[in-house]
Image (spheres, rainbow, N blue to C red):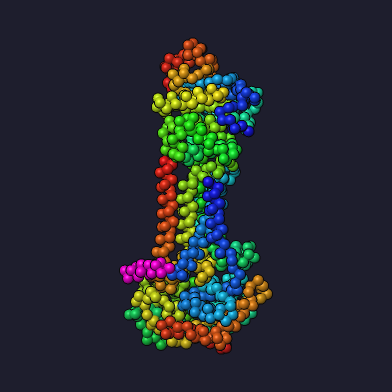
Amino acid sequence: MNDLTQPGMPRTAVDPMLPLTLAGVGFAHRGQHLLHDIDLRLGAGRTLIMGPNGAGKSLLMRLCHGLLTPTSGTIRWNGRVPNPPLALRQAMVFQRPVLLKRSALANLTYVLAIRGCPRRQRKARAQAALERFGLAQLAQRPAPVLSGGEQQRLALARAWLLAPDVLFLDEPTSALDPAAIRAVEEAVDHFHHSGTKIVMTTHDLNQARRLADDVVFLNAGRLLEHSPAERFFAAPESSEAAAFVRGELPW
Amino acid sequence: MQRRHLLSTFALGIALSAPLAADDERYITLASTTSTEQSGLFADIVPQFRETTGIDVRVVAVGTGQAFEIARRGDADSLLVHDTQGEEQFVADGYASERLDVMYNDFVLIGPSDDPAGIADADDALDAFSRIAASGSPFTSRGDDSGTHRAEQRFWEEAGVDTTGGWYRELGSGMGPTLNTAAGMDAYVFADRATWLAFDNRQDLAILFEGDEALFNQYGSLLLDRERHPHLKHDLAEQWHQWLVSDEGQAAIAGYAIDGEQLFFPNAGHH
Amino acid sequence: MPIADNAFATALTLIVTLDPTLLNIVRLSLQVSLSAVLIAALIGLPLGASLALWAFPGRGAVVVVLNAFMGLPPVVAGLMVYLMLSRAGPLGELGLLFTPTAMVIAQVVLVLPIVAALSRQHIEALLGEYREQLASFGLGRARMMPTLLWDARVALTTVVLAGFGRASAEVGAVLIVGGNIDGVTRVMTTAIALETNRGNLALALGLGLVLLLLVACVNAAAHLLGERARRQMG
């Protein structure tokens, strides 16, 4: 089980999860092949998955996180088959944050409760997380009435309390205004500096330039490129990636 | 918070259902007819019986046919109905060990006060039934296999009337609803006097024919067979059965009146 | 409308004077219907949630049967329970016929399908929204259930109230299994039926108004709760 006594302090150091390796991973749904033969190895740092619309970015992330099971190929965490204890060391933030129909504070105490945190510690830890993400004033506000940016920060605060070794973010800023985008990027930085592996999809080239350590480029369900961010943006290997970086591929 | 809420809901439920279970007092369940219950007789005489014996009588009032069925299935401790033929058959079939006459009232023919069929001056009950059929005036029948319905059918049969015409409306209802319907459509109706006297929604209806001895409506109490349904409260039921025909019970029945009019006439010891 | 005027006067008199017979009938009605709804909710909410959460062979059939039973005529439910509880029936030994407990059972039969079928619909809709997030938290289906039931509480309250409405308004089932025994199993609806049968339309309508008032109060309370929750939760 995840050790929740020190929020934001992943266990990677003592029991590393990385690297995450995918070998020949494919996914088909109702006879349609959506992902083909993905070979990928992700180490520490911030990985950004990019590609035009329908490339399979979200799908790839769901397979990595274990929400979906690949129809072919294997996924290994530091050589281990995905299992429930490993899944508990991951968290995911969705494009449209899924928040419970409760107060902001209750959304946070909820995850502490399901992870077995003692009742009397929950409120204080949830408050601390709200403060860290600039939501302290909104503790008692029902989550569904928060603005899009506030909701996404609340989802990040919730993920923070899970102290994940790996955090998946599926286009977390695509529906937000610039100020909210900046707040989310700062939050991602928090995670990164506390040692959490970041896997994130985005449409936003500038955001990718700001955040990425390495870039995975998908097109039409195929992995075309996985390279360090500088090389990807300076000299993409594939012509598709080159067109994408120039902003010529439709999202 | 969630758990506390659930617990309090649960506690509320327990609190509400608790009084339903507490039920150790002495009582019997009596299957009887709607006409007796609706006339208000039981509400008057049961307290007197309870006073004497400490036994309460819970009356399930249904049609005579259903009352027989309830007793046959062992769902009532005692039976008080008004279908002498059926009662005697019930004893013969071994469901009851004894049948006693308790009281009678009488049936009356009721109809719109302008009496389109002219039954008010009929020679006898059969003549009155024939006149209704001949005039084609609407007639509402209970059609529920009750004692009253069975008695009514015997009159049509004896009068040789075919009741399949559109004037004959079979309702499948108790006495009260049938009277309500008759009042609504200005129809003739065959009813027991007790229910009629206790009935409020008369509108234009009135008693048009009464007094013929053929309209005599005998009630009998049945002592159910001990061996067939050993679980029943036979001892308590027998006290009720005997009290009905005792001097005290008979006086109680004779004493029940609505607006000064006696509804039931005790006649235990006849037969 | 002399009967109607009379009925309002009768109803008012009954309520204002706190007529003991009326209070007794109202208390028993509430006891029976609330107990039935409570039991139906304790079984029906988890059942509905389970049907939403787990796919198993024959689930479609179960859902169709539940939906069909939502429209079960009360008399038929009453007859079924009567035959079960009758001395000649399989549960006759319990001696429950013509008791309030029998009425509770009959109303559970009426209310349970409503609670289970409607809560399945609501939970299924909410599950569509929550499934990925809850799975991401590492929750299995069984552990998703309490979260779903709690977060659907506004809709489920309405469902349970619909059940209460059906239970408190029906007459056919309780008449058959309760027997409408004065002071023991006589509830609002059977009392109304009896007074109608006696041609005592004013009293019947008066009792009907009291029943209407009760159901209206319960629904108003629920409506206010729901509105408050909706305002809070957007």
Q: Residue at x 53, y 60 (%)?
A: B16
Q: Is residue A29 above or below residue B123?
A: above
| Quadrant in the rendering for residue B29 | bottom right
Instruction: Name the residue nearer the viewer: B125 or C120.
Output: C120
Q: Is residue C121 above or below residue A223?
A: below
Q: Is residue A203 above or below residue A131?
A: above
In this rendering, does residue B151 appear at all?
Answer: no
Secondary structure, magenta segment, majority class = helix
Task: Determine the residue located farthest toward the top in the rendered image.
Answer: A235
Instruction: Name the residue nearer the viewer: A85 or B87.
Output: A85
Q: Residue at x 49, y 26 (%)?
A: A187
Instruction: Name the residue nearer the viewer: A59 or B1.
Output: B1
Q: Residue at x 45, y 87 (%)?
A: B212
Magenta residue span = C1-18
On whether residue C4 falls in the magenta region, the answer is: yes
| Quadrant in the rendering for residue B101 | bottom right
